[in-house]
Structures are given as C-alpha cells and as structure tokens.
Image (tube, helix red, strand yellow):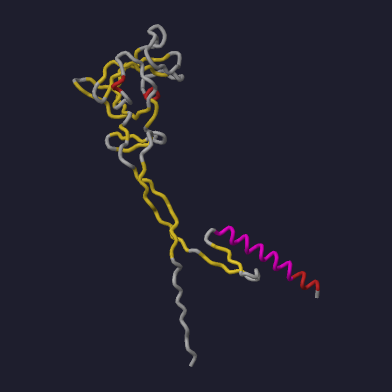
Amino acid sequence: MKMKLLSVLIIFTFGFQFLTQAFETNSTVTKVFNSDMTGLEMKTNWFRTEIVTNWINAPPSYRLVNGQLYDTRHSIYWGEVSDFISGLKSGGIYANLQVESIGKTSIICAVYENEKGIRPSGFPAIDETLSGAFIKRILIYHYPNQNELITGQLLMSCVAMRVENWKANGISLESYDCGLPVTNKIPVLKLVKVKIDPPSISVSSTNSP
C-alpha cells in the first residue's frame, strides 16, 4: 500500500513539473492556482499579429539619387569613389582627387594615382602626394559641404554611387553622386501582437427521442 502511494506521489510530482514547464514556455498561458493549491486552472490569452507602420527620421546613411532612396551601408551600388574609378593600376593603389572647379551642385576633380597607397586630405605637398600619374577628370554631384571646398584642395574620402556620365560640348566625364539627405520621415514596418477576445465556441445539443 505504501509503495502504491509512493508511486502515485512520484507520478503526480513529475506530471506537475511537466505541466509547469509547459506553461512557462508558452507566453500566452497564465498559471492560476486555487487557494488551497490543490488544483491548476489554465487561462489562455488570445493574440493576433498585425503589421504596424512607424514613421521615423531617416539615418544619415539614407541618401536620395534621382528620387531613388538608398541605404549606403548595404547597397551594392555605393562605395568609396576612389574604389570605383576605372583606369587605376592593380595592387591596391588609391586615387588622389584634387578639386579643379566648383559648381552649384557638382565639382570637377583631377584624379592622380597615389603611389604610396595613402588616402590624403587637405592640401597636397606637390613633391609627395601628387607624385602619381594624372589619370583623368571626374565629376561628383552633391559632395557634402561642397561650398566649403577650395580649388586645389584634396578631397576627403567620400561615399557615392556611379551615375550616368556628364556630357557637354563634346566632353564626357565619369560621374558620381553622393546623394541628397532625406528630410522626410520614412516608414518602418513592425510586427506587433494585439490581444483579442477568444473565439466563440457554439455547442449544439441533440434531444433524444
């Protein structure tokens, strides 16, 4: 008799632990104990997943080019201008970009090979940083703070995307665009759980003859 009671107690204990773990791993189930701790009731919360649109300020990495929105951190079309320029030697040689002219929305730069593989900034020392061969001229649209640039200055590294060549008076220049900042808020979709009333269950009864 004692062995039977012990067996029942062990089974009840393990069964109770199993139920408790099952309820704890289900976020929609709430444990409710009777006051005398003799029983266990289960109350289920019902949820529906909805898509909610949040409007946020665009981070600086979001840029507009010809009305198209890009995230410069993840787009394959964006990168360092010097990494895109064609005509450089192989072997990791960078390009020095020297400002030659400044327009309203664009600048024209002379491109030189940087034989030392160093990305320069500021004004060049003619006998050092511009010792590489002249390659070509390029055009860059919407360079950040371009009104602060000075003719003859070497550009800081900038991120841009390759765009259609600029053409005028029989001249064609390889062109890049740093894009415009995004001033409007952008939508971000998010999945949220919304609590709903439980579905109604209809029980039909049949009367025996």
- The reply to whether residue 118 is in sight is yes
Q: Residue furthest left?
A: 169
Quick one: 154 or 27, which is closer to the camera?
Answer: 27
Toward which corner of the image does residue 130 lie, by quadrant? top left
Residue at coordinates 26% horizontally, 17% vertically from top-left? 101
**Residue at image x 39%, y 26%?**
80
Q: Position of residue 104 (x, y in %)?
A: 24, 24
| Residue visible at 73% across and 71% down in the picture | 8
Q: Is residue 62 above or below residue 22?
A: above
Q: Position of residue 183 (x, y in %)?
A: 30, 37
- Magenta stretch, main secondary structure, is helix
Residue, far right: 2
Residue 130 drawn above or below residue 104: above
Quarter that holds the N terminus: bottom right
Q: Does the magenta segment cover residue 22?
A: yes
- Residue 55 in percent (x, y) is at 35, 45
The magenta segment is: 8-26
Using the image, determine if residue 112 lies above or below residue 162: above
